[in-house]
């Protein structure tokens, strides 16, 4: 056998490197989808504008001051020049013209739009970050530990803890504190090694405590069903109206009311992944559950989550704009696209740019996220992959 | 079948109970109280506040308040804290206003999206398909309030008709034909706006269902044996693609109370969404909770109806 043959044999038997890496393959498919590519480009531009806008509009002497009121200059159309004689030198806009015109208080709409871009960006990303985190944890729990059963003792401890918390919230301080302490004592006792050892030979009456009731999966998915019963915009509106107005409230509330879809995706993915060979192999090697979940399963389950997160950002931006429009958004001196439009609607026939510019901005950004997300979905779908 | 119905009804009642607990908790644990809504009003003396709190059980612990509230709700005696009107009749009155919006909006959505979706699927990848796809993304992405103003400007400038409100003020003496015309113009824009999201989502869904069915073997067989193409598309493919949509009749039920807050406030339409909005502003807890409760019932009833319809329509599913 010549050395050449052994060499070719060796290359045949050695594991072959894929012709293209995963990323190259992804990029090759992605480039074909022109709408998704355009979405990505707009998204990148929006990101730059939002970050640049934050730098240009904040600080003590910003380049573009979104809050500077110039009453003689109100309701000027876009690209109109500032009246130099009427303004103090410090009040002049940067280029001497108002790129996007001025509003009814003579504030520079361009500066306000720049400020609003940052609000839209952070609301979208933080809200979706929260909802994805909650969704992965809840869905992962249901998918990975779903077959475990909850025994009566767990339920009782939870009930005691909840009652204690409820009593505290209702204003019965001493009683609530006692119940909470008792609940915690019970909890720690039952998970301490001493309690675990004791538990093996419980008296007959207390054996009832270990009776299995329902599955973790059932519990979690019923909870998801309950959350899905609330009409989401109405729920968000109620909570935002009751809590003090701030941008953080809105992010958290939008995030905490939109995780159900992610949770369902992750659960479905986990249910199929945990039956696969590589998970079984990892378990046979003695890898810990947490490492299996986060190192081996989550990366494989992330594709549908990524898609729903991208589309979730779009809908979070829309929700924030809707809330701002109704007057529940970020409090007034701060500009957001929703409240520029909401303030401008009174002048819709005299100053249409106050409606059209923010409206078009929201439309373009949300559209780019939606197109990008749908493009991702097409590419990550294995059936489409094989065809190309 | 009977066991399925029984089990799901019990399950849904349990879910409803938890929904009622959660919504009650959310609204009462949030800071602030309805008796503090108007602290600057000189008529709102501390004695008044005390009387108000006693009258609506606000001085009781939370679980008793919960029991009081749902006892009143289930016996139909809940009154609004704002004006002492019975909540159910208030909601019914507003519901009758929202109903035409819902019906016309749903009709528009379904009649537009089916032809569009089917045509996109048949001419897949063509210029029609691609522009319909892009347009449906635009419709999903456009903020409702922005689209509303675009439509208002267009309609008012082009057709010179008033569109805000349910009817033009002072038309009561006009002949009925004029009144009807006026009502229809007022109904048109909010219904179109209510239908936009539906058109976009539904037409995409019709398209994907249709594509799914078109790739099945029996469609290829039908084509191979030389049937005319309209027969292949409309008889063999479309009929089977329609199956999942029968169940969607159940899923549109929640839309009955989900009447859009934003659209109704733009058009000053005195519907349910606006009632909810006013109740939230006034912290009128009974109205908020009742609307929420009804919404939850409709969501649950909707999934139940759609499950049942699935069984009735699709003989392959057995229970």
Image (cartoon, rainbow, N blue to C red):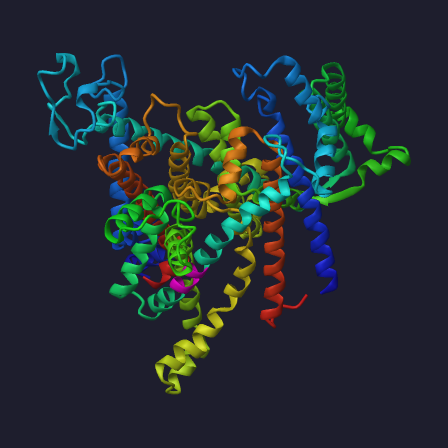
Give the residue furthest to the front: B173
| Residue B292 shows in the view | yes
Q: Main secondary structure of the magenta part?
A: helix
Number of numbered markers = 0
- Nearest the eye: B245 or B194: B194
**Residue at image location 32% in from the left, 58% down from the top:** B133
Query: Can you give x and y, in whole percent of width and height, for residue A147 in the image?
Result: 67, 46
Query: Can you give x and y, in whole percent of width and height, for residue A302 in the image?
Result: 45, 44
Q: Is A341 included in the stretch rendered in magenta?
A: no
**Residue at image location 73% in from the left, 19% down from the top:** A176
Query: Can you give x and y, in whole percent of width and height, for residue B280 in the image?
Result: 53, 32
Q: Eyeballing the image, is B269 above or below B279?
A: below
**Residue at image location 44% in from the left, 33% down from the top:** A127
> If the image is split into quadrants, where does the C terminus of chain A sit?
bottom left
**Residue at image location 62% in from the left, 30% down from the top:** B81
* Side of A13 relative to A131 (left or right): left
| Residue A144 shows in the view | no
Q: Eyeballing the image, is B110 above or below A330?
A: below
* Side of B168 relative to A80 (left or right): right
- Nearest the eye: A328 or B178: B178
Highlighted range, magenta? B107-113
């Amino acid at each position: 056998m010549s050395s050449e043959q052994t060499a070719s044999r060796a290359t045949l038997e050695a594991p072959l490197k894929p012709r293209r890496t995963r990323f190259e393959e992804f990029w090759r498919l992605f480039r074909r989808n022109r709408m998704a590519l355009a979405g990505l480009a707009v998204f990148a531009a929006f990101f730059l504008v939002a970050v640049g806008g934050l730098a240009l509009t904040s600080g003590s002497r910003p380049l573009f001051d979104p809050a500077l009121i110039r009453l003689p200059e109100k309701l000027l159309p876009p690209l109109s020049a500032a009246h130099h004689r009427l303004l103090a030198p410090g009040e002049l806009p940067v280029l001497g013209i108002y790129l996007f015109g001025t509003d009814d208080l003579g504030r520079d709409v361009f500066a306000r739009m720049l400020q609003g871009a940052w609000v839209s960006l952070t609301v979208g990303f933080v809200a979706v970050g929260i909802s994805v985190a909650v969704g992965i944890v809840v869905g992962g729990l249901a998918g990975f530990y779903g077959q475990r059963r909850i025994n009566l003792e767990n339920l009782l401890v939870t009930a005691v803890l909840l009652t204690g918390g409820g009593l505290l919230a209702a204003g019965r301080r001493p009683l609530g504190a006692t119940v909470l302490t008792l609940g915690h004592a019970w909890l720690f006792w039952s998970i301490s090694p001493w309690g675990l050892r004791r538990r093996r030979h419980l008296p007959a009456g207390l054996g009832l405590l270990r009776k299995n009731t329902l599955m973790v999966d059932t519990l979690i998915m019923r909870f998801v069903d309950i959350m899905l019963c609330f009409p989401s915009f109405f729920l968000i509106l109620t909570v935002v109206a009751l809590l003090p107005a701030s941008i953080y409230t809105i992010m958290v509330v939008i995030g905490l009311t939109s995780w159900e879809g992610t949770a369902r995706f992750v659960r479905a993915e986990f249910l199929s992944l945990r039956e696969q060979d590589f998970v079984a192999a990892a378990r046979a090697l003695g890898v810990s559950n947490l490492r299996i979940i986060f190192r081996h399963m989550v990366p494989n389950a992330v594709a549908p989550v990524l898609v729903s997160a991208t589309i979730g950002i779009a809908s979070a931006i829309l929700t924030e704009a809707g809330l701002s429009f109704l007057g529940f958004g970020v409090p007034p001196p701060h500009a957001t696209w929703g409240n520029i439009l909401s303030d401008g609607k009174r002048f819709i026939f005299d100053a249409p740019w106050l409606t059209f510019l923010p409206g078009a901005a929201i439309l373009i950004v949300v559209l780019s996220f939606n197109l990008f997300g749908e493009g991702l979905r097409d590419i990550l779908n294995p059936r489409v992959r094989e065809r190309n | 079948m009977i066991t399925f119905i029984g089990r799901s009804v019990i399950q849904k009642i349990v879910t409803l109970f938890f929904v009622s607990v959660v919504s009650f908790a959310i609204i009462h644990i949030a800071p602030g109280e309805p008796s503090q809504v108007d602290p600057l009003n000189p008529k709102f003396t501390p004695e008044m506040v005390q009387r108000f709190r006693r009258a609506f059980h606000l001085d009781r612990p939370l679980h008793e308040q919960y029991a009081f509230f749902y006892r009143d709700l289930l016996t139909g005696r809940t009154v609004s804290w704002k004006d002492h009107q019975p909540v159910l009749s208030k909601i019914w009155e507003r519901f009758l206003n929202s109903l035409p919006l819902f019906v016309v909006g749903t009709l528009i959505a379904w009649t537009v999206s089916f032809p569009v979706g089917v045509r996109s699927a048949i001419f897949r990848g063509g210029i029609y398909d691609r522009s319909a796809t892009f347009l449906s993304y635009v419709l999903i992405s456009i903020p409702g309030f922005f689209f509303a103003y675009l439509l208002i400007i267009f309609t008012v400038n082009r057709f010179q008709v008033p569109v805000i409100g349910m009817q033009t003020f002072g038309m009561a003496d006009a002949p009925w034909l004029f009144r009807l015309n006026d009502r229809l113009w007022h109904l048109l824009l909010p219904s179109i706006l209510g239908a936009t999201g539906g058109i976009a989502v539904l037409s995409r869904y019709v398209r994907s269902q249709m594509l799914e069915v078109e790739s099945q073997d029996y469609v290829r067989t039908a084509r191979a044996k030389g049937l005319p193409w309209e027969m292949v598309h409309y008889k063999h493919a479309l009929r089977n693609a329609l199956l999942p949509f029968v169940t969607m009749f159940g899923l549109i039920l929640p839309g009955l109370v989900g009447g859009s807050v934003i659209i109704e406030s733009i058009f000053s339409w005195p519907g349910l969404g606006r009632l909810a909005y006013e109740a939230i502003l006034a912290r009128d807890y009974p109205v908020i909770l009742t609307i929420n409760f009804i919404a939850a019932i409709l969501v649950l009833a909707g999934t139940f109806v759609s499950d049942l319809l699935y069984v009735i329509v699709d003989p392959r599913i057995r229970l």
